[in-house]
Image (cartoon, rainbow, N blue to C red):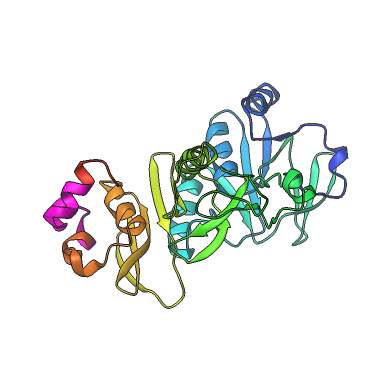
């Protein structure tokens, strides 16, 4: 997705960052003297910044959001990641974005002017819903599907990043453009289209990504009014979010050990009364789960 911006057509060296061809074209365009402006401080923009590190003179990342990775991190976790990125030479302009361009100059919404040699547009993607919408199907930010991956059109199914569906952690409908969910949706749609019966009824958002050696893993949601358990120091943060006696989300930076246990608790809607949550808060470990639940996990059913 490339948003309309005044004067964008005057920028000669501008690139999206979505395909291998985009990356190869960008690689050819930059030199050790290049000043690069990246629009978008999300997953795509920051991975681009990491990839350009050491290849160019200067990297500036701007975003309308007030923090980096705003779709997956809260203020405290984002601040830790931003500090780490800045320590590796990435410059940020947050809470503002490019308002207009004139050649190799961008005028930001806050009035600042940023000069650059190469522009990268990394503001994300939008689902292509036109084919379903034009056929009379229900769409929002994505193609609306139920737990069987059915649209509201007879015998029409949809799966993957183009869909909008139920997030059990927040009890809301949203686009969750993630490979594991797309895989499960594809399986579900395929079974049902072939005459079988399948449901994908435990979808949650989740992300695992790292920059310059610092990794983060997030899953689920952080609903208003939930309880939060935190452990943090200068090199890591662990935040667990609990609502109605169940784990509904987490954010981890720095410590990635056995995070799948937390994810499984969210997906399975496991009551925390059935596990030793006091131990799990310290370290995700199978010993904190019941024998029956451990057997379920170790057999790969989660």
Count of marks placed on residues: 0
How far across and down, in percent of the image, does residue 234 sit?
Answer: 33, 57
How far across and down, in percent of the image, does residue 127 sit?
Answer: 67, 46
Which of the two residues, 226 or 85, is positioned nearer the viewer here?
A: 226
Q: Please report the residue visible at 68 percent of the width from the left and 51 percent of the height from the top.
A: 153
Looking at the image, which residue sits at the far front?
A: 195
How far across and down, in percent of the image, does residue 60 sit?
Answer: 63, 45
How far across and down, in percent of the image, does residue 191 sit?
Answer: 48, 39
Q: Please report the residue visible at 33 percent of the width from the left and 49 percent of the height from the top.
A: 254
Residue 29 is a magenta residue: no
Q: Main secondary structure of the magenta part?
A: helix
**Apparent side of residue 171 relative to residue 229 in the rendered image (left or right):** right
**Apparent side of residue 246 relative to residue 97 in the rendered image (left or right):** left
Quadrant in which residue 112 is drawn: bottom right
The quadrant in which the N terminus is found is: top right
Picture layout, residue 270 above or below residue 33: below
- Residue 235 in sight from this viewpoint: no
Residue 290 is a magenta residue: yes
**Apparent side of residue 261 relative to residue 143 in the rendered image (left or right):** left
Q: Which residues are magenta?
A: 281-296
- Residue 19 in sight from this viewpoint: yes
Which of the two residues, 147 or 42, is positioned nearer the viewer here?
A: 147
Picture layout, residue 263 above or below residue 227: above
Quadrant in which residue 80 is drawn: bottom left
Picture layout, residue 84 above or below residue 18: below
């Amino acid at each position: 997705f490339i948003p309309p911006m005044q004067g964008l057509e005057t920028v000669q060296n501008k690139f999206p960052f979505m395909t291998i061809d985009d990356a190869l074209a960008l690689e050819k365009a930059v030199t050790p003297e290049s000043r690069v402006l990246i629009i978008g401080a999300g997953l795509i923009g920051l991975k681009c910044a990491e990839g350009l590190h050491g290849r160019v003179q200067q990297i500036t990342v701007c975003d309308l959001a007030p923090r980096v990775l705003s779709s997956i991190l809260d203020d405290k976790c984002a601040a830790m990641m931003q500090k780490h990125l800045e320590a590796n030479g990435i410059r940020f302009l947050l809470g503002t974005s490019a308002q207009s361009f004139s050649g190799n100059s961008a005028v930001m919404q806050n009035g600042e002017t940023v000069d650059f040699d190469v522009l990268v547009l990394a503001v994300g993607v939008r689902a292509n819903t036109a084919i379903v919408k034009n056929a009379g199907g229900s769409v929002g930010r994505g193609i609306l599907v139920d737990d069987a991956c059915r649209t509201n059109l007879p015998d029409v199914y949809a799966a993957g990043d183009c869909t909008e569906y139920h997030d059990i952690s927040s009890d809301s409908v949203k686009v969750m453009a993630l490979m594991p969910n797309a895989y499960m949706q594809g399986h579900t749609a395929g079974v049902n289209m072939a005459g079988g019966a399948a449901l994908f009824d435990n979808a949650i958002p989740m992300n695992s990504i790292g920059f310059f050696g610092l990794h983060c893993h997030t899953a689920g949601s952080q609903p208003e009014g939930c309880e939060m358990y935190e452990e943090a120091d200068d090199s890591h943060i662990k935040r667990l979010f609990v609502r109605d006696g169940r784990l509904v989300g987490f954010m981890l930076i720095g410590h990635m050990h056995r995070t799948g246990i937390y994810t499984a608790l969210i997906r399975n809607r496991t009551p925390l009364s059935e596990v030793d949550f006091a131990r799990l808060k310290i370290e995700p470990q199978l010993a904190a789960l019941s024998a029956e639940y451990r057997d379920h996990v170790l057999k790969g059913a989660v």
